[in-house]
Structure formats: C-alpha cells, structure tokens
Amino acid sequence: MALTNNRKVLEFVNESAELACPDEIVWIDGSEEQLAALREQAVGTGEMIRLNQTKLPGCYYHRTAQNDVARVEDRTFICCKNKEDAGPINYWMDPSEAYALCREIARGKMKGRTMYVIPYSMGIVGSPFSKIGIEVTDSIYVVLNMAIMTRVGTECYDYLGEDGDFIKGFHCKCDVDPEKRYIMHFPEDNTIISVNSAYGGNVLLGKKCFALRIASCLGRKEGWMAEHMLILGVTYPDGSKHYLAAAFPSACGKTNLAMLIPPKHYLEKGYRVECVGDDIAWIRIGADGRLWAVNPENGFFGVAPGTNEKSNPNALAATRQGTIFTNVAIDPADNTVWWEGLTKNPPEKLIDWLGNPWTPASGVKAAHPNSRFTAPAKGCPCLSPAFDSKDGVPLDAIIFGGRRATTTPLVYQSRDWNHGVFVGSIMSSETTAAATGAVGVLRHDPMAMKPFAGYHMADYFGHWIEMGKKIKNPPKIFNVNWFRQDKDGNFIWPGFGDNMRVLDWILKRCAGTVDARETAIGYVPYAKDIDREGLSITEETLESILYVDRARWGAEAEEIEGYYKQFGDRLPKELRESLETLKANCRE
Ligand code: OXD
Ligand code: MN
C-alpha cells in the first residue's frame, strides 16, 4: 500500500511501474523489520551471503557482475536542453533522446521482479541543507545500501506532505548489459535514470548522481555548493574545534584523511580528529558570513583494499557491524572477509571476488581493486558529534589534492579565494580503479569534480568565484600532495596519521600563527615549521618535497593554458588572470 498521498510521488511510482511492469510494488518504510526481511530474502536467493554473525554482526556480502565493478564515466550523461550547458567535459545527450532510449531499454524489464520505492533524505530531515529523493529500484541490494548510506523512512513523506518536490531516481538492473548501461541525469527535471548496472556508484542514486551531479546544479541555482569533499574536525588541547573540508579524486585517501589518528605526541598533548564525512559536502554561507558544511550521507561507501589496522583503524572498526561488503574476498575458514592490504600475509585459502578458490600463489588479486564496504557512519569510533548537526560545521580551510608523483609540493596555500579557485581548477591526478578505464594516467580533475559536476565546468568555476564575492569570512584554500615519489618510485611522505602534521600547519596558517615562504604558486611552509617529531624523514628530504621548481611549473602553466582552451569565453577572467600570474612568476 502506498505510504504517501503526495501526488507527485504517486505519479512517479505509477509511471515507473507502467513502464517497467514489476509484478509487485513494495513501499520501503525504513523499519528494521522490513529491512531484516529483505536481507533474509536476498540470502535466500543468493543475492547476498550472510557473513559470520559473531565476528561481523549484521554484515553481508555481495558480488556484482564481472563487467559491473566501477563507475562508468563514458556512459554517464548530463541531459540538458542545450549541449553547451553540459560543457566540454561531460558526456551529453538530448533529454528527449535520453528519455526515449532509457524507456526503450527499461520497458517491461521488471516483469517477474519487485519494484521497491525508497523515500530518502540527503541530510537530516528538516535541516535547511537537506533534500528528499525517491528512488525506485528492482534491487534489494540497492535498498539495503541506500538504507545505510542515506536516511530512509516515512518521515521523508511527512516532510514532503501532499505537494512537496523531490529528486526522482529510476533504477533498473535490466540485463546488466554493459552495452546498454546508461547513467542519465536530467538537471532541468531533477530526475536520474540508471539502467543495466548494479554497481554502487552507478545505482545508489542518492550519492554521486543526486548529491553531486544534480545537487551541483541546484547549488548553483540556489546559492550553495555541492562538493566531492570529506569534512573533518580537529579538536585542540584547549577544547576548541576547527573544521576542514578536502577534495581529492576518487580512491585518493579521503576516507583515510577524514578518520586519521594523529601521531602519538599529538594525542598526548590532547589533539583529536573527528570525522564528519568522507566523500561529499554540501556547503552554505552562514549568518556569520562563514562557510558551513554538512555531510548529506549517513554511511561510508569506502574502497576496501589498503584499509587496515594501521592505515585506517576507524574505518575498519566501522566495517565490523551492519556492513555490506561488495567484491572483496571471503575467508571460508570463518566466513569473514579479506582484501589486499588487510593483513600483511593473506590467508592460505580464500574465495576470490569472482567466486573462485584462491591461494597466495594464484597470481591474481583476491579482492577487486575497487571492492567496497558500505558501513553505517554510526559505527565509526571517531564520528564527530557534529555529524547530526542540522546547521553543519564552520570551515576554517578548504584543501584540494591529487595524486602527483612530481611537481606539486606537499602543501601550499593560495594567495586568496580567487587564487584558491584557480588552484582547485588546475588539479590533476592519476586515475584509480574507482572508474572503468586505465589506472595511473595523469588527468585533470578540477576540484575532484570532473566526473561529478552536473553542468559546464567553466560555469562551475564561475559559481565558486561568485560564492567568493558573498562570503564575508572565507576559509583559506590549500593544496596538498601526499604522493610525491623518489627516483625509485617510493612515496617520500609517510601519509596516513602523519598527515596531521600538515593539517597542523594549515590550521596555524588559518590562525595566522606561522610564517610561510611566498613562491611562484603560493605560500609554502618553511621545512622547520612542519612537525617532524618521531619521523625519520630529514629536514632536507622535507625541503625536497616542499620545493617549487619554477621550470616544471612553467611547463605546467603551458599545459594548463592548453587545458583551459576548451572552456573558451566561459572561463572566468579571474582564473585567466591567475594563470597569467603563474606564467609570469615562473619566468621571473
Ligand atoms: C566514490 C567515488 O565511490 O568517488 O566515492 O567513486
Ligand atoms: Mn567519491
């Protein structure tokens, strides 16, 4: 029975059912009872495997199809009326063509299946930041993941009332045919359609599709920002709290930074780091003229490989209960999970992500490099008390960062907001397994939003510039690079918890308590000002990763000039000016 009398919801559900012809419609109410019954059902059909309930209470396992393991950027479309409005970086399709294509693909595809109607809120229901979505799907896996990643329940209908608006999301697994896989966004209709996939990033429509692509369009219209950023809080020994948001491309360590445990001597002095979010930030200007951020999600859809007791004990702890694991390996000895990097030595025998017997001699990975955990935020030991704040947290700093073996120093600070927007716009990073395609290829990923901005990238830069004009007390903007390599390809900076040392410098810059060296690209620390207590890295080595090589940056500027060309006249003049300054600084 329908759980709402909102006529727009009823119309959307009816239209979806008329198209896909499910045998049954199930209205999700968010109750534990209903979710438990769905878990049972999924275990019964083999869609999920129940893991060891003593060691991993409430945890389940799922395998996707082999051809369906990552986001598909080349099959992800922005469908707005004018092609120019999608910009040169997005794939574009005419809305009527895209609707017709998807309808053709999804017609009758839920025959013999159930269609679930999921009411969910991104953010706490009733917070000024929050927005409601309705996703219809034929996948129990999607329902159960959405129930972890978002706030699912009938309170969303109460909030909508009879006439409230929401973001429409239609998902149908169809035949999981990669040739007919499409992730379509209709920003002018607040609608998302996803067909022929069951991989999280393509089908948990509250996440990338809504909270970034559609929300970035809403933010532009309504004067706020939807960003691919983690949010973390640092508590000082005197109890004061300072918040930072950081944008890194997919699988570049956002979850690890968001949950870092500071080095021992910081802990002893009383420093703490708390996680507000690990992937998405919705940001508004507060009454105090500062930027305030919330994490609209309710869980972590994290990359499993590499997560371990040392790299991220908080994330690991979060995955120990109520978690769905996707495409990791199963340890048949005790029906638990394993992935590369979880332990130094792998177990003797595993079942790999494809379902095959595996031993350390197999010569292939046991877990897929983009295998994931979907873990409830509440299970994270360092979750910030501000996680549930309706007002969000005020930002002292925004950090950009990518995976760069050379050129980009460990950290530098922009000269001001507009220069900070330039720094974000020129971000580039080596590709990872989070999306299909080659791994390790250097590409531009401005503000880590290349795959997620729902409109023209130059207009998105323009929106940042416009926001800057309205923010009376803007956060300071920085860039970090944890990934500098030596000539043998080893990472020079230890990363993980030691990144606290860099956050410390950043926060000191925000407080105006530490000096910096002005360089061609912005302010860079003096090596002596980065804490090295307990680190084996010498001051000289640190100098080497703080060094700004003007010849390299000159070449980088030339390359950026070529990159910017695609944006034509739409590129904000402030960014062009910053580029000219960079070129001049490198020539001097
Ligand atoms: C993610 C991604 O899953 O960026 O967060 O791909
Ligand atoms: Mn992400």
Image: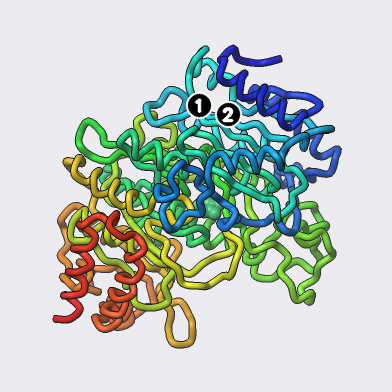
Q: At 28% from the left edge and 77% from the top edge, which residue is drawn?
A: 553
Label 1: how many Cα within 10 Å (few below 14, some 14–19, many 20+): some
Residue at left offset 64%, top offset 15%? 3
- State left or right for residue 28 relative to residue 129: right
Residue drawn where x is 21% and y is 53% of the image: 417
Q: Where is residue 56 in the image (x, y as percent from the top left)?
A: 70, 45
Compare residues 344 and 301 and report the one nearer the observer.
Answer: 301
Whether residue 265 is visible here, answered yes or no, is no
Verify CB contact (< 8 Å) between mark 2 and mark 1. Answer: yes
Q: Is mark 2 within 8 Å of ligand 1?
A: no
Name above or below for residue 6 compared with residue 227. Answer: above
Tell me if the residue at label 1 has its CB under 8 Å from ligand 1: no
Query: Is residue 103 in sight in this rendering?
Result: yes
The location of residue 202, given as percent across then percent down, is 61, 47
Q: In this view, does 329 lie to the left or right of 575?
A: right
Q: Is residue 157 above or below residue 370?
A: above
Q: Which residue lies furthest to the bottom in this view?
A: 487
Frontmost residue, 306 versus 212: 212
Pick the residue in front: 519 or 164.
164
Q: Mark 1 points at which residue?
A: 166
Instruction: Tell me the residue at 49%/33% (across/down).
Output: 190
Side (left or right) of 528 relative to 282: left
Q: How is the image coloured?
A: rainbow
Q: Name which residue type carries label 1.
A: Phe
Q: Quadrant of the C terminus?
A: bottom left
Write down the residue under mark 2.
Answer: 134
Q: Is residue 548 above or below residue 206?
A: below
What's the distance in space between the residues labelled 2 and 1, CA to CA?
7 Å
Q: Which amino acid does label 2 sit on?
A: Ile
Q: Element under label 1? A: loop
Q: How many neighbours does mark 2 have within 10 angstroms: few (below 14), some (14-19), or many (20 or more)? A: many
Which percent across, then down, holds residue 33? 72, 24
